[in-house]
């Protein structure tokens, strides 16, 4: 019986070792703009944070486009 334990002990020890650490999962790319990341985090407390953040992102993008158009018009007038 003792010899059986002596044979099984190394096999069990080797089976317990899995050969190395598990690979770390890659972090997903954050969605949306930096300004709306906190809004997206409200999903965990029951708000539809992604839908709200998408609308805010769209509004900010439109605002940025309009600002660019106004800047171009201003630059054209100054020349």
Image: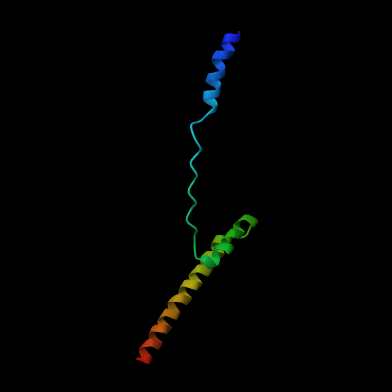
Question: With respect to residue 23, does 17 lie above or below?
Answer: above
Outermost right residue:
45
- Quarter holding residue 48: bottom right
Using the image, determine if residue 1 lies above or below residue 69. above
Direction from residue 65 to residue 13 in the image, left or right? right
Type of colouring? rainbow
What count of labels does the image hold? 0
Say which residue appears at 65% left-offset and 57% top-offset: 45
Q: Quadrant of residue 9?
A: top right
| Residue situated furthest top in the rendering | 1
The C terminus sits in image quarter? bottom left
What residue is shown at x 47% (from left), y 56% (from top)? 29
Q: Position of residue 19 (x, y in %)?
A: 48, 31
> Residue placed farthest to the bottom in the image?
78
x and y percent of residue 49 in the render? Answer: 58, 61
Q: Residue at x 53, y 69 (%)?
A: 56
**Residue plotted at (42% across, 83% down):** 71
The image position of residue 34, as x and y in percent, is 52, 65
* Foreground pick, 36 / 45: 36
User: In the image, 28: left or right of 9?
Assistant: left
Give residue 10's quadrant in the image: top right
- The percent coordinates of residue 1 (x first, y second) are 60, 8
């Amino acid at each position: 019986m003792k010899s059986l334990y002596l044979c099984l002990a190394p096999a069990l020890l080797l089976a317990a070792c899995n050969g190395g650490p598990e690979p770390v999962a890659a972090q997903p790319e954050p969605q949306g703009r930096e300004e709306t990341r906190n809004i997206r985090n409200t999903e965990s407390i029951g708000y539809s944070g992604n839908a709200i953040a998408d609308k805010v992102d769209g509004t900010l993008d439109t605002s940025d486009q309009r600002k660019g158009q106004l800047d171009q018009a201003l630059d054209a007038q100054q020349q």
